[in-house]
Amino acid sequence: MKDWSIQVLGLSWDGETAYVIPLHHPQSPFNRKWLQVLPHLKRTLERKDLKLVGQNAKHDNVQLAGGKIFLEHTFDIMLAAHLIDENRPKNLGYLSQAYLGADNYKDLDLKPDKILKIPLRDLASYNGLDVGYTYQLKGKLIEELKAQPRSLRLFSKLLMPASHVIQQVEMRGMYVDQERLYDRIGELQSHIEKRTDLMKSHMAKSWREDFNFNSTQQVARWLYSPRKKGGLGLPITHFTKTGNASTNEDAVLEHMTHPVVKALLEYRTLQLKWMNTYLAAWATRLDANSRMHPIYKLYGTVTGRLSGDLQQVPRDTFIRSVIGAPPGWRFVGADYSQIELRIAAHVADERRMKRAYVLGEDLHAVTAASIMGIPQSEVGKEQRKKAKPVNFGFLYGMYPAKFQNYAAKNYGVSFSMAECEIFREKYFELYPDLVKWHRRVRRIVQDRQYVVSPLGRVRHLPDVLSRERSVSMEAERQAINSPVQGCATDLMLFAMTQIHPYLKPNEAAMIMTNHDQIGFEIREDKVDYYAPLIKDVMEDLPLKKTFGLDLSVPIIADVEIGQYWQGIDDAAGLGFTGYS
């Protein structure tokens, strides 16, 4: 791990006394020989009889692994606190004050460029309180978990094992094809410059040289200033909270017809998202082996969905296929097929959906045939493409106005408002048990202020009692979709824990996860062995034995093999979908 170092390491055996070991710090007696201390720490910390407690332990373990110390904690207070109440803060400062009545001690600036300037005594005191409070919090949180047996089971059987597996995924990292990465950065820059030149041709010459298209204030001035002053003279339709003219994409720009606005929207996608957030940023994160190490958070969302720096990557070959497998290895992607729809069919006891899955029908084709009034045999690629947003949008009760924007933005499908209204009506005629499910969940959350997923994950929704109807309606919407979305992620995480013991690091490894997909790199001569094994494990999870869940629909995993993450059959392509 490049430039690896730990400044101070803190340990506590009883929560009362903390032992602080200063390593890489100017005032440390070990400062020049701190690497020689690590083997002694390794022998102690890797003892099999130790039960380790940590706060965001995965992060600490990844850091320690850089020093060849490999740990797995038995209890992570951040994960436990998140599972008990996902809405509250999970940081150690808050938890120590809330549970232990501790004073606020989180007043040091621990940024990498500042930490070595902090006096060692102050740093050691801070670190000692960290480990002492961490140990003490474990006792408080375990009692709360014991009072909720399903939460305790989810914590011990899923979250802690998943944390250990994700730790391995982060440490291994993903291989990035650097030649392809830099080629695409260059091509992307060319597309950005074309749009920049087009936009500058529609503004006054005096503005062009120093104009910043990333500045919302400058863009607003250009869009709304009168033509005689060099602007486009477009009408102002929305304002920001501070009273300025808005350039929000969803509310404003997507509804403008001026051709230069299309260039602006494309520029924002290409420069701010594709270039700054992904390709250019990835180029700075590669280690000596051309690997990028993602970061995943098991506590990052209130729904239970995994959060991380790969979760929002566009579904475009141009971006995704710079990630893959090194020479001699293959990238294997295993996706759960329509997993949210399957879980919803089970939870809602929706008979037509369940029948489709039990019979092996394609639910998108079933929906397309019904809403378009054609036989399933006539459903083609375009009809199926239109059915996808219908299924995923109306599943949770989305209304026509929001659905119209959702379908266009997420699936590139345009519907008239009349079509949205008709398709929504036909959708619930086809799947009437979804309506009953929505009503049932709304009654439950109004009564209890929480809902529970099929695996036992609790989603607390106190806002459902709000007197503001928009707030309470949002809580009701979350009550419907959170258990399904959270369960989908939990199944994927459980699959990762079940697959991991079968993988030999010199033959196969998990290198990433993205929503309902797990990515692997597998040695070429071992693909035929591991690919079917992965599929079998994912489709035959011991859910009933482990969690008491007996799903009423089959879960299916689709496995693809290639050299890259997406567009894996297009090893040489430089396709640029959707832009010219």
Image (tube, rainbow, N blue to C red):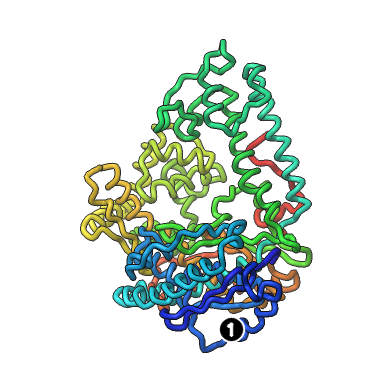
325 sits to left or right of 23? right
Q: Where does the C terminus fall, quadrant-wise?
A: top right
- Which sits in the foreground, 92 or 241? 92
536 sits to left or right of 33? left
Residue 89 position, x and y percent, is: 39, 59
Q: Residue at x 54, y 77 (%)?
A: 72
Residue 445 position, x and y percent, is: 26, 57
Q: Residue at x 50, y 25 (%)?
A: 256
Q: Where does the N terminus fall, quadrant-wise?
A: bottom right
Note whether 371 is above or below 556 in the view shown.
above
Label 1 residue SS? loop
- Which sits in the foreground, 126 or 321? 126
Note whether 329 is above or below 236 in the view shown.
below
Quadrant of residue 568 in the image? bottom right
Quadrant of residue 214 in the image? top right
Residue 186 position, x and y percent, is: 75, 41
**Kind of residue sitting beneath label 1:** Glu
378 sits to left or right of 197? left
Q: Residue at x 44, y 27 (%)?
A: 244
Residue 487 position, x and y percent, is: 42, 63
Q: Which residue is mark 1?
A: 46
109 sits to left or right of 353? right
Q: Residue at x 60, y 24 (%)?
A: 260
Q: Give neighbour class at mark 1: few <14, some 14-19, many 20+ (Cα, 10 Å).
A: some
**Visible residue check, residue 201:** yes
**Visible residue check, residue 536:** no
